[in-house]
Image (cartoon, coloured by chain):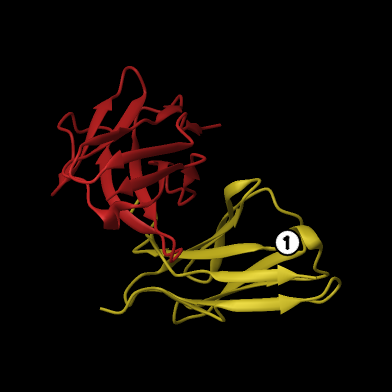
Chain colours: A red, B yellow
Amino acid sequence: AQTVTQSQPEMSVQEAETVTLSCTYDTSESNYYLFWYKQPPSRQMILVIRQEAYKQQNATENRFSVNFQKAAKSFSLKISDSQLGDTAMYFCAFISNFGNEKLTFGTGTRLTIIP
Amino acid sequence: KAGVTQTPRYLIKTRGQQVTLSCSPISGHRSVSWYQQTPGQGLQFLFEYFSETQRNKGNFPGRFSGRQFSNSRSEMNVSTLELGDSALYLCASSLGGPISTDTQYFGPGTRLTVL
């Protein structure tokens, strides 16, 4: 069974600074996808970024980028120039590439951006 | 394109009652997944429907059931409600397919409170 671990329950950072959220996962599969989702206080889960395991290049989306280390099974999220709107719960999630639509989530990191 | 919609947004029920939640996926999406989110257990996969068939199921008792209609809209039903069923129920849709790990897009959720 796949597991996803987020070891930082809470983090805070000053506005405009850079912050990195950690995620590790465990799987025996070689082909899979990893995601970071953001859940603001409004509760709507929003996709932040997606990474295919077969791609060596790290995914980026504007201020958001990942550091994907397949051998180490690590998938961290870096937020640059953090903004107040980045305040949210961040969930790391895993899905395998076998027609299985089941996302396995980590326990989340509560990120607070301080003005 | 309209996002995933869920109705109702809030529900209050008493123990022993049953409840039906509805989810309308993004137009063109054929897969609908359901998740339960609680402070104690985090995000847990309930089930996934594709082309009106349940394709995957999580580890929940038989009181939790669902279905999908020909227009891809989905409903989930919880019978004989228990206090522990109080949670945010999230629906997610994706394009789906025989072998698919498309990105899942989430609705705003239905907050169920069982008294």
The residue beneath circle 1 is B85
Return the residue nearer the eye: A115 or A6: A115
Q: Residue furthest front?
A: A115
Disc 1, SS: helix
When the figure is inspected, residue A31 is found, relative to residue A44, above or below; the finding is above
Q: Residue furthest top?
A: A71
Give the image location of residue B56, x and y in percent. Answer: 56, 53
Task: Specify whether B52 is left or right of B41.
Answer: left
Give the image location of residue B88, x and y in percent. Answer: 59, 63
Q: Is residue A53 visible?
A: yes
Instruction: Give the residue at x 51% y 32%.
Output: A2
Return the residue nearer the eye: A71 or B49: A71
Q: Residue furthest right?
A: B16
Quadrant where the image shows the N terminus of chain B = bottom left
When the figure is inspected, residue A68 is found, relative to residue A92, above or below; the finding is above
When the figure is inspected, residue B10 is found, relative to residue B37, above or below; the finding is below
Instruction: Give the residue at x 27% y 50%.
Output: A115
Return the residue nearer the eye: A53 or B14: B14
Quadrant where the image shows the C terminus of chain B = bottom right
Instruction: Give the residue at x 28% y 58%.
Output: A85
Return the residue nearer the eye: A21 or A4: A21
Task: Specify whether A41 is left or right of A77.
Answer: right
Q: Is residue B99 visible?
A: no
Give the image location of residue B41, x and y in percent. Answer: 64, 46
Report the amino acid beneath label 1.
Answer: Asp
